[in-house]
Image: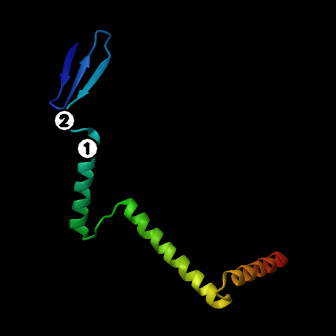
């Protein structure tokens, strides 16, 4: 067939006219990842902010929520008693009261 293309990608046409691609060098994904890294760097330089990955952001937020949950549990225990059995009993009383109101 006919060979057309650049140094990174060639297109071969077979006898039926179908195009076959052959890529050498870096993949398109690698090129896009490099461009993304460059954009992040330029953003950091311009705005002075450190870009973090979604996974790092998720982990940070998740830890914040866990910390808040522990604080709420501590405040609940402080107000209504600290024992698990006592807390369950008080929670059941609160749920009963809510059902009476609803």
Name the image quarter holding the N terminus: top left
Residue sitting at x 51%, y 73%: 66
Dot label at residue 30:
1
Q: Is residue 92 left or right of residue 52?
A: right
Quadrant housing residue 61: bottom left
Q: Is residue 45 above or below residue 97?
A: above
Q: Quarter of the image holding residue 85? A: bottom right
> Within 10 Å of the Cα at label 2, are there few (<14), some (14-19), or many (20+) other Cα atoms?
few
Where is residue 55 drawn, in percent x and y? 39, 60
In the rendered view, would you say 14 is above or below 59?
A: above
Left or right position of 74 against 57: right
Residue at x 76%, y 78% (from the top left corner) = 92
- The single residue placed furthest to the top in the displayed view is 15
Which sits in the foreground, 36 or 98?
A: 98
Q: Which residue is mark 2?
A: 25
Q: Position of residue 10 (x, y in %)?
A: 21, 25
């Amino acid at each position: 067939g006919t060979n057309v293309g650049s140094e990174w990608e060639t297109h071969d046409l077979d006898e039926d006219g179908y195009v076959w691609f052959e890529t050498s060098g870096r993949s398109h994904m690698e090129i896009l990842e490099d461009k993304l890294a460059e954009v992040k760097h330029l953003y950091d330089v311009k705005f002075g902010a450190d870009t973090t990955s979604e996974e790092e952001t998720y982990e940070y937020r998740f830890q914040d929520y866990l910390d808040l949950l522990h604080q709420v549990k501590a405040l609940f225990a402080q107000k209504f008693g600290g024992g698990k059995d006592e807390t369950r009993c008080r929670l059941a009383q609160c749920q009963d009261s809510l059902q009476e109101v609803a």
